[in-house]
Image: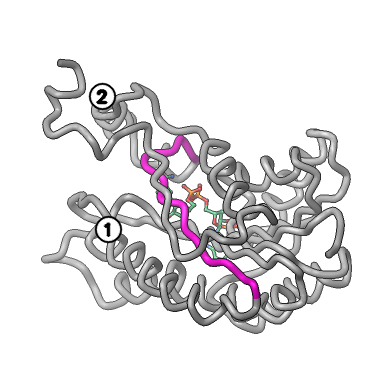
Amino acid sequence: MSNPRTVLVTGATLGIGKGIASVFAKNGYNVVLTARHPEKGEQAVHDLKALGNPNVMFVAGDVTSLDSMKAVVAAAVEAFGGIDVLCANAGMFPSAKIDAMTEAEWDAIFDVNVKGMLFSIQAALEALKQSAAGRIVITSSITGPVTGYPGWAHYGGTKAAQLGFMRTASVELAPHGITVNAVLPGNIYTEGLQNLGEDYLNTMKASIPMKRLGDVEDIGNAALFFAQETSGYVTGQSLIIDGGQILPETLEAVDA
Ligand code: NAP
């Protein structure tokens, strides 16, 4: 087994992906970040190296292209000798109500969130098979698998689809010692979430028993649990990290 282990994180230059990458960097992993825009990538590498781990690199890639993801994986393997953990995290969450949703909007979100997850896994699979303890951690969401929110029917569909994929993937890949699990974030304070506006953020905060939005490293710590060599008997599972948001029966119950 390569020591230290190497993690590839997709959608890693902002938000949850960057938080996942920072937790792995702090825990001594070699960290490969990928996303489309190099300038954000270089900034993320700079920020992560400042945590004290020099073994952090960025490779530009688009999860909607299998060739692009194969090139990212090749660069990671060349730099660090292999990949032990894939965090398939890249995703988008535009809003569209059902009565006005276009075919293009439907296709775009499934391309990134579902097909992008598949291509990331397909590209990394050979390297993960070579690892003595290969791990795949998918970033799903509470939205879709557990909850609903107007405007996110297509988004919720993608996040539930990821879990359907995960269950068969965990069975298919078990003979290779590869586990496949998912983190289901609630409302995590990221650049993407900030774009939804102050009203959205305040309403969400009020509905969360912990009375705060999640931090990106809350998700990173859960991903690290699934990624560890010692978690090899945990597969096909999903872990909600939401400060208790899905639990209250009514909004009043949060403050009762
Ligand atoms: P974000 O702040 O918008 O960051 C998205 C990241 O993905 C960026 O690094 C972006 O960089 C990259 N990306 C987007 N499209 C890509 C593509 N086609 N190929 C490669 N990289 C791409 O998003 P976030 O809030 O951190 O969300 C990350 C994941 O968590 C998503 O899967 C989302 O569904 C899930 N999630 C988020 C929340 C939340 O509260 N924030 C809650 C539940 C689930 P480039 O634009 O440079 O490519």
Taking the spot 52% from the left edge, 43% from the top edge, the residue there is: 219
Asked if residue 64 is among those painted magenta in the image, a careful observer would answer no
Query: Spatial distance from mark 2 to mark 1, Cα to Cα?
Result: 21 Å
Against 51, residue 145 (above or below) is: below
Q: Secondary structure at mark 2?
A: helix
> Farthest front residue?
233
Where in the figure is residue 183, as x and y percent of width and height? 46, 52
**Quadrant, the C terminus:** top left
Does mark 2 have its CB less than 8 Å from ligand 1?
Answer: no
Q: Is residue 61 above or below residue 71?
A: above
Q: Nearer the viewer, residue 173 or 220?
A: 173
What percent of the width, then of the height, locates residue 22?
68, 41
Residue 86 at what x, y percent from top left? 64, 64
The residue at the point 41 percent across, 72 percent down is 167
Identify the residue at the far top of this view: 256
Please state which of residues 76 and 93 is positioned toward the viewer in this rendering. Answer: 76
Reading the chain from its start, which is encountered first: label 2 or label 1? 1
Q: Quadrant of residue 125?
A: bottom right
The crowd level at tag 1 (other Cα within 10 Å; few <14, some 14-19, many 20+) is many
The amino acid type of the residue labelled 2 equals Ala
Q: Which residue is mark 1?
A: 144
**In the rendered structure, which segment of residues is drawn in magenta?**
177-190
Callout 1: SS: loop
Which disc is residue 105 wearing? none
**Residue 174 x/y as whole percent:** 57, 76
Q: Which mark is residue 206?
A: 2
Rendered residue at 72%/58% (across/down): 7
Q: Is residue 57 above or below residue 221?
A: below
Colouring mode (rainbow / by chain / secondary structure / one colour): one colour
Cβ atoms at labels 2 and 1 below 8 Å apart: no
Q: Amino acid at mark 1?
A: Gly
Query: Which quadrant holds residue 119?
Result: bottom right
